[in-house]
Amino acid sequence: MKQSSIFIRSIGIAFLSLYSSILFAQTYKPPVFTDSARLKRIEATYPVIDKIYKDYAEQNHFPGLVYGIVVDGKLIHSGSVGYTDLKDKTLATSQSDFRIASMSKSFTAMAILKLRDEGKLKLDDPAYLYIPEMKEIKYLTKDASPITIRNLLTHSAGFPEDNPWGDRQLANTDQELIDLYKKGVSFSNDPGLGYEYSNLGFATLGYIIKKVSGKSYQEYITENILKPLGMTHTYYEYDKVPKELLAHGYRWIDNQWVEQPMLHDGSYGAMGGMITTIEDFSKYVALHLSAWPPRDDAETGPVKRSSIREMQYPWDVNGFSPNNKTTTGRPYPFASAYCYGLRWRRYVDGMTAIGHTGGLPGFGSEWTIYPEYGIGVISFANLTYSNAGTVNIQVADTLLRLSGVKPRQLPPSAILLQRRDELLKLLPDWNNAQASGIFAQNFFMDYFPDKLKAEAAEIFAKAGVPIRPVGDVVPENQLRGYFMIYGEKANIKISFTLTPENPALIQAYHIELVAK
């Protein structure tokens, strides 16, 4: 779990704009959205993508690399470079099993949310309710609040960043974890006062899963998440992986690869022990993509869509990268945050990226989804702490740029369409607007009829007589959006915001001239 930690909470905050489960008789199948033209444009990028991965693997001395592209609920492309076992010259494939390190954390988080949805725990419960040994913890100050499950999920429990110490604890027993708490732990912050990446925190969540469910976290996750998804080639213990499929881990030392010993599964596996394939993991990626957009469809996944979206929410803002650039050199700043076992980035143009890196002695991996585009990128390598995130970002940027695919558009709500049509009947004269019944109580206290009429008349005159139909409402959300009126000389943009009342009324309005 080598992670780069940036402790800048306040700056990033400004950049945030943003049934109970059933038993499954059949394997969950994510919704697959078919758009043949879109897929063809993406398929045309495959040769470039393959070359990017191949070149990156060679330049960085990866013994083996496997990768996959998930689009609209389906693994549409995968590839591989090199070997999973250098001694036996076993070729890497999409069916090879790689240890994915910290990418395991979101499965642990998902299990916690599933137990929460079943009413078996609460995220704001003190952790000591489930691990009594934690009740006697000595915090940095006497007025510190106790560690909660939510603190553990968001790396805000106050534990110090524990890379690479945590990586070597993978095989520890549950008793060793409990003994650590009995002896006492050291804190870098009081709980809830800062983000600091903690493998101990996720090992603790794994033990809470056991206490609440009555099963080990491995059993609970396998039965309730992996099997329903059809992830039948995913493991925690490497001894259970078929020999010919297991990826061996290596270090690059003195211009040669040195094989690294594999660690057995244990209490810290909840933070980084999972072993899986591109084909299996793509099903998990598809599940995360299927949570978008929010909709009325029946629940068909192992966890509610709303809980998956909750997992992906930026709960703990921790960084801002103003100098970031794309692979083509274009300035592309972003804010970053930690979710529940996931990392979040919001770029300056509004694009959102969600996923996680992973690193252990012998391995490095990364996955990212772009929910607005319905696209996910995955790669696993068998080199110690290999930086798979850099190449995945390059691939995603290349795919979006070359294919020209556009983000999914939120459909406007019925009330936005209704208020647009009613507003159009009043423009540009604003005659009888106060009697129309479409404006909120505040509106004519904040906007004055004579000024509204004068402003609209001037802008309409400058735009010229409309020569095209009025444009669709472009929604920012279900109660805010804008539409265009197209004129001979210029266009008119009209933005409006509705109230929380039912029915929602217009509380804010803005009109502006836009050059053609």
Image (cartoon, grey):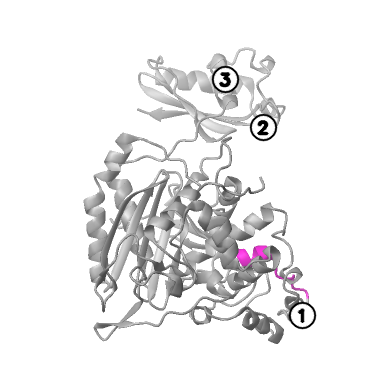
Circle 3 Cα neighbour tier, 10 Å, few/some/many (<14 / 14–19 / ≥20): many
Q: Is residue 149 magenta?
A: yes
Residue 499: mark: 2
Check the image and name the residue furthest to the top: 431
Q: Is residue 164 magenta?
A: no
Boundaries of the magenta span: 143-154
Q: Can residue 150 be seen at all in this image of the molecule?
A: yes
Give how far across and how far down residue 237 sits, in percent.
48, 73
Residue 65 vs residue 462, the one in the foreground: 65
Dot 2: element: loop
Q: Is residue 227 above or below residue 41?
A: below
Q: What is the CA distance from the residue labelled 3 to the residue labelled 1?
A: 63 Å
| Picture residue at 63% right of the left edge, 80% below the top | 177
Q: Viewer-nearest of labels 1 and 2? A: 1
Q: Viewer-nearest of labels 3 and 1? A: 1
Which residue is the site of mark 3? 423
Q: Amino acid type of disc 1? A: Glu
Q: Is residue 370 above or below residue 486?
A: below
Q: Amino acid type of disc 2? A: Thr
